[in-house]
Amino acid sequence: MLRFTVRRLISMVFILFAISVITFMIFNVVPGGGSEGATLRIAGRASNEVTRAQVKKDYGFDQPVYVQYVRMMQKTLSCELVSYSNQTNVCEEIKRGIPATFSLVIGAAIIWVFFGVLFGVISAMKAGKFTDHFLTGMAMVGISLPVFWLGAMLLYYLTFKIELFPPGGYEKFSDDPWQWFYHLILPWFTLSVLSIGFYSRLLRSNVLDTESEDYVRTARAKGLSEHRVLSRHVLRNALIPIITLFGLDFGAALGGGAILTETVFGLQGVGQYAASSVGSLDLPPVLATTLFASFFIVLLSAIVDIAYAFLDPRIRLEA
């Protein structure tokens, strides 16, 4: 088990390294994203050749690409990376956006897990009946709605038309807990709708499959109540794929899945910072936010693999 865990952790390092190289190289070949574009943004488009040459020397743009990469990674790891567009410290900007991103994703995750499991169990227990058909239809609607469209519609009708919710922005929990909660209601709902639909459909299928297993029929034959059969035998096994999926989805949401939601509601989180940096082809914050996102995705994936290996020794032997 220890060897398996160590291999997974080592693979995390290699994956993050590969992601950093790919991100760096892509921005060096995109028009306006290489050292020439960065020089213009730093020196100004009206600058002369002498000024641009000095900027290239100061920032190392006159060095080979691999030297530029190593230099940028050193600054990233030491939190000394500076944006080319506005000369702000990238690490500080990410730290400033973390509370909004974590508040959004954690709250939405609680909602989508709770209602996804609840609707999935109800749908399975009422399979073939009106309740099942209704929840199935609602789940398909939730899965089909684009996040940016749903967020825009909620803002338009519930904020600007009815004036029931604030127009966006993020309020710190330490400043006003109620305003923090009030400002996040619509973003939480927007981010969780798709996952609620997907989780409920997946759990419904898992519950129905598990109910046909021999050990479940044996439990019923022994006279156990339906509640005990459901909680102790059916759900315990049907939830395993849900737990795995949650680990991956939660990491993906922290790592960038919330970008559209943050942008629509102006939450000023890490995702919105990443989106604005991509729009301005600002490599330092793009690289840092990409690594930030990748870290959580890879970490949660590794945790899921390790948990599976702990539960099923056969996985350790195959890996």
Image (tube, rainbow, N blue to C red):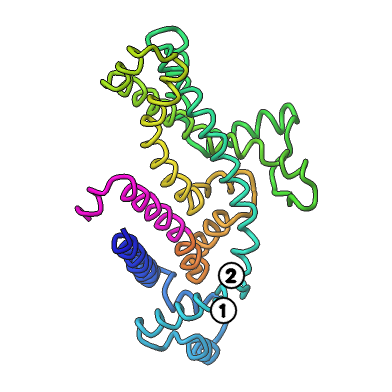
User: Which numbered disc flags the more N-terminal residue, 1 or 2?
Assistant: 1
Q: The C terminus lies in which quarter of the figure?
A: bottom left
Q: Residue placed at 44% from the left, 70% from the top? A: 32
In the image, 159 versus 251, the foreground residue is 251
What's the magenta bit mostly, secondary-structure-wise? helix
Secondary structure of residue under mark 1: loop
Q: Which residue is mark 1?
A: 80
Residue 120 coordinates in the image, percent (x, y)? 44, 23
In whole angstroms, how far apart are the C-alphas of marks 1 and 2?
7 Å
The disc placed on residue 293 is: none
Q: Which residues are magenta?
A: 293-319
Q: Is residue 303 magenta?
A: yes
Residue 287 coordinates in the image, percent (x, y)? 46, 67
In the image, 139 versus 210, the foreground residue is 210
Q: The N terminus lies in which quarter of the figure?
A: bottom left
Give above or below for 72 relative to 153: below
The disc placed on residue 91 is: 2
Amino acid carrying mark 2 in the image: Cys
Residue 207 coordinates in the image, percent (x, y)? 37, 23
Amino acid carrying mark 1 in the image: Glu
Q: Residue placed at 80% from the left, 52% from the top? A: 175
Report whether residue 30 is seen: no
The answer to whether mark 1 and mark 2 are in CB contact below 8 A is yes
Give above or below for 100 relative to 158: below
What residue occupies the far left of the structure in this picture?
A: 318
